[in-house]
Amino acid sequence: MVALAADALPFKDLPHHSPQPGRAMENVKKNVALLATCQALLFTNNTTAIAINGLAGFALASDKALATLPATGLVIGGALATFPASLLMKRIGRRGGFIVGAIIGILGALLSTAAVFQESFWLLCLGTVVLGMYNGGAQYYRFAAADASPPDFKSKAISLVLAGGLVGGLVGPELSKHTVDLFSVRYAGAYLVLTVFHVLAIMVLSALRIPDPGAEERHGAARPLAQIVMQPTFAVAALSSALGYGVMNLLMTASPLAMGVCGHPFARSEEHTSELQSRLHLVCRLLL
């Protein structure tokens, strides 16, 4: 569903904003740089959550079979928010929609922090669902870059934004290693620090200059969702994505728990730690 809004806000020459093509292109490159920064902040959030959700769930769950439910909550939240985020951006624009998503992310981080302090497993599950909603909206960063770029720059814009995730893949696990024991209650510090990255994302997004949708774009006719879903290409793409994400999440959820059971502490300085595994996984995923 992430791709459903990819053509919601097409690139415009904007003669009333910038009569010179060179200046218009400078604005495009600035937008791409800002969105790449936001992508880095997003992946810092994601890699931290991936590294600790299962471990925090294991620590709080009375039934250890439910330990990975907070990690599942992150995925569920993203799935629930993806389509509503698209509709919201269609009405208030990309920048407004992204900022709303980051505010939701702050709420999710605070709920998760409170859950760890209160030793409430189910509150942690709720917090990770809300954190996942931030992810659902932020998945549109690359599409926003494409929408605001001329045709010959679209593919490069998407690549540059996705490359920003490499920074988050390196920073997130390292950050969690140093903040997991920031307070006397383990994992609370790692969740609380995520609020800082959401605030930084809001600050960066405030400088974004992508045209808001016009009246025709907000209220104009669009292809019915049923028509899109009935296309064979949609079915192939959706099934491939579901399979790929299923395998990926199985690996990313189980690995921190398995390494803990095998005696590799999360934040120890030696080579074989859970946070190192998360870092290598995310970096290799983006490089390939």
Image: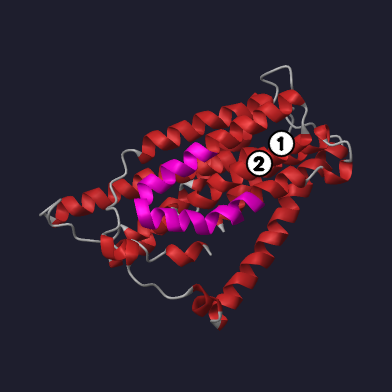
Q: Is residue 32 left or right of residue 101?
A: left
Name the image quarter holding residue 279: top right
Towards the viewer: 83 or 219: 219
- Residue marked by disc 1: 124
Circle 1 Cα neighbour tier, 10 Å, few/some/many (<14 / 14–19 / ≥20): many
Point out residue 193 in the picture as x, y percentages from the top left corner: 57, 27
How many discs appear?
Answer: 2
SS of the residue under disc 1: helix
Relative height, residue 72 to residue 275 (above, below): below
Q: Residue at x 60, y 27 (%)?
A: 192
Point out residue 56 in the picture as x, y percentages from the top left corner: 76, 34
Towards the viewer: 23 or 205: 205
Q: Is residue 213 left or right of residue 50?
A: left
Q: Is residue 135 left or right of residue 60?
A: left
Q: Residue at x 41, y 48 (%)?
A: 97
- Residue marked by disc 2: 128
Looking at this view, name the residue that lies furthest to the front. 219
In magenta stretch: residue 94 = yes
The stretch in magenta equals 76-104
Towards the viewer: 226 or 181: 226
Point out residue 274 in the picture as x, y percentages from the top left corner: 74, 38
Magenta segment's dominant SS is: helix
> Which amino acid type is shown beneath numbered disc 1?
Leu
Tell me whether the residue at label 1 lies in contact with that at label 2, contact meaning CB atoms closer than 8 angstroms: yes
Name the image quarter holding residue 53: top right
> Which amino acid type is shown beneath numbered disc 2?
Thr
